[in-house]
Image (cartoon, grey):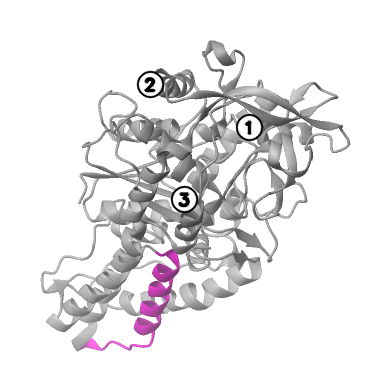
Amino acid sequence: MSARTVIISPAPTANGDLHLGHIAGPFLAADVHARYARAQGREVLLGTGFQDTSTFVVTTAHRRGVPPAELVATSAAQIEASLAAMGIGVDGYTGDDDRFTGWVVDFIGRVHAAAKLELRTMKFPFSTKTGQFLVDGFASGNCPECLAEGCAGLCESCGTLVAAGELIGVRSTLDPDDVVELREAEVLVLPVERYREGLRAHFAAHAGGMRPHMAQAMAAMLARPLPDFPVTYPISWGIRVPFPEVAGQVVNPNAEPMAWSMHASALAAEARGAGPGTEDRLWLAGAGSEIVYFLGFDNIYPFAIAGPAMLLALGGQYDLPARYLTNEFYELDYRKFSTSRGHVIWSRELAAEVPRDLIRFHLAATSPEHQRTSFSRDALTQVTETRLVGPWNRVAAKVNRWVGLGPLPVSERAARAAARMAERFAASYELAGFSLNRAAEAITEQLARLDHQEPAGADAGDYCFEVAQLLHSAAPILIDLAASVLGADPGPGPAATGAITPATLPRLDSAGTGR
């Protein structure tokens, strides 16, 4: 086992707050695994942050009629507050400070100094009205691979790289009536095709580190020649590069992921007491880190192909990430979340109305691990009441009858049952079989089993011991309930001493009754 686990959830774009779709995807999963692993005594670091270099910041600011810098400042604070409101325990939270931008330029500069970036002439959509090139969020159209409608850069549907000049029916996102033509510009690219065999070998050796959809997509992309990956863009929004052959250009935001991930890792380590060091110290070959990504399927190209190709270009300095826990889209009433249409539920607003343990449980139960799933407020109320709140409150009432009656004996049978319960949860929390769905299902099943029991005096200790184990096992999801009984560091389970002194168990409030 590695000396430490470094968990990375890609930074959301700083163009708004986090809705439930963000939380139900990578963030809740990353937090749950981190909490579980720490309860087992392992060293775990969790990093995320916000990204302000995306062109979607500019397009959103234009739509809202605010300066981009103002949108970034507001969104950065909202994102951090929403993560905290949902109990996502982030160690390293990245921003847009000089340390980060300087490291991105440094890292890209190393690839450039190694002569691994090459000047290429590429075609980009060009706005005849503004005199500007259109890339990523500035250019809309249809994906040339799967035909889905979207923007340039990355396809949300199939996960492939979408060159702006290859969009079908390309138009300006900011002004659909603008006359757009293709023009050439010289940019620096990484010839990713040169690293395709290395990527294929790496992912073939770590096939178990991907969920099926990603594995299928990666196999398809790596089975054919990979296009050149533009590392710089001929636009003004972003981190300016110092290379004279592309003077005035900026770093493609999708070329930032490896440098950003290293920076997030370093911040996380420092937040947990590590001394100062290089930004990449946890990523160096032989550093003993297992890098784990919890991310949306639409992010696999920059984080699993272009980014690792950059690491390969640096000649073995770094170990490649080998584990990716992807998620699909989480919808609202079977339609995509849309801030522009007002079809959205904000995480902080819901957490102000409903106990967050209930939200975390429901999002775990409906997490889009392998296919799109959907949220509804009615389902939240019904599911949490029937599977969590009602059963827990009845179980807690049974345990509370024995509070204050001194240590109660615990049989070997109950100790074995508790150990088996812990194993069942561990199978859902360990990375090899990680599943929020199954963890939530385990909570439901064990609560139902204990709810149906009517403990008498002779087996009261057994009952209380098994309930205590359930609370320990559910702690990564039901964080407030666990903390109120077990404290901030719950540990893996109750001490197996042959006896238990029951603690008072609180009731859970229903989703329909507010906080």
Q: Compared with residue 397, is residue 320 higher up or lower down, i.e. above or below?
A: above
Q: How many marks?
A: 3
- Packing grade of label 2 (10 A; few <14, some 14-19, many >=20) is few
Secondary element at image label 2: loop
| Secondary structure mostly seen in the magenta stretch | helix
Three-letter code for the amino acid on which mark 2 is drawn: Ala
Residue 453 counted in the magenta span: yes
In the image, what residue occupies the spot 45% across and 63% down?
A: 212
Mark 3 residue type: Leu
Boundaries of the magenta span: 435-457
Q: Secondary structure at mark 1?
A: helix
Task: Identify which residue, 71 or 192, lies in the foreground.
Answer: 192
Q: Which mark is residue 74?
A: 1
Q: Residue 306, how many percent across, how many down?
A: 47, 39
* Mark 3 or mark 1, earlier in chain: 1
Between the C-alphas of marks 1 and 2, the distance is 39 Å
Tell me, for residue 222, which label it has, or none.
3
State whether residue 305 appears in this view: yes
Question: Looking at the image, is mark 1 or mark 2 nearer the viewer?
Answer: 2
The image shows residue 180 at horizontal and vertical percentages of 82, 32
State the residue lying farthest toward the right: 177
Mark 3 or 2 closer to N-term?
2
Q: Residue at (55%, 74%) from the top-left corner?
A: 383
- The residue under label 2 is 114
Mark 3 touches mark 1? (CB < 8 Å):
no
Q: Which mark is residue 120?
A: none
